[in-house]
Amino acid sequence: MSSKKTVKVTTKPKVVKMTTQTVKKQEKKVTSSAEVSKPKTTQNKTALLGAPGNKNPWKDGSKILSIEVTDDFYINMAMAPKQTLPGAWGTIKSIPNVDYARNVLAITPEFKKEISHVQKYLVKKGTRVQIGIAGPQQYGGREYLGGGTQVEILPRPSARYLLPSGEPDKIN
């Protein structure tokens, strides 16, 4: 059950403008359907940006940490066979196989038809990311459970904020 609250959030106005939330004067009171437990940590279905197709990418009731990267921060990203540019979602965990990407990270064929390899990326300092638990997704009559740690790169296009690190690893 979600209720609307008005809270103080200490985010940069540029980030807030990327949302459906409204900004009011210097205090930046933000109104949204997400409950905020403390600045830069949200709880519930949505955070600053959602998944494609307005599907909830986060596990219901889980905390979503929104931070600006200040040190070297690496993520792993499941990639399609001919994908050359990064997407906006990755994980801080290793991705051992396609089954893990599909079921633990809930990457449905709707988001990525095929997964062939994993690329490690360095997230540039100053980049805003959200970290939380992948929520379940449904596609083609099948449920992909989620439950893994996922990272969303908020600035779009994400390729500007990610640098490949090493060679891609093939997975099956």
Image (cartoon, grey):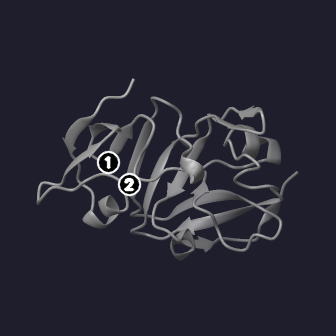
Q: Is residue 166 above or below residue 52?
A: below
- Gap in angstroms between the C-alphas marked 2 and 1: 7 Å
Type of the residue with mark 1: Lys
Instruction: Check residue 67 in the rendering and tell me which mark sits there, or answer none.
Output: 2
Name the quadrant containing residue 121. bottom right
Q: How crowded is mark 2: few (under 14 residues within 10 Å), some or many (20 or more)?
A: some
Q: Do the residues labelled 2 and 1 touch (CB within 8 Å)?
A: yes
Q: 127 or 140: which is nearer to us?
A: 140
- Name which residue lies at 81% across and 41% down: 99
Identity of the residue drawn at 36% across and 40% down: 42
Quadrant of res 122: bottom right
In the foreground, 84 or 124: 84
Q: Where is residue 118 in the image (x, y as percent from the top left)?
A: 75, 59
Mark 2, secondary structure of its residue: strand
State whether residue 97 appears in this view. no
Residue 40, label in figure: 1
Q: Residue 137 has which mark?
A: none
Q: Residue at x 37, y 62 (%)?
A: 18
Nearer to me, 163 or 147: 147
Q: Is residue 151 left or right of residue 164?
A: left
- Three-letter code for the amino acid on which mark 2 is drawn: Ile
Residue 83 is drawn in which quadrant? bottom right
Q: Is residue 145 visible?
A: yes
The x, y position of residue 86, in whole percent, is 64, 68
Q: Percent position (x, y) of residue 56?
A: 53, 41
Q: Where is residue 94 in the image (x, y as percent from the top left)?
A: 69, 49
Residue extending furthest toward the top = 1
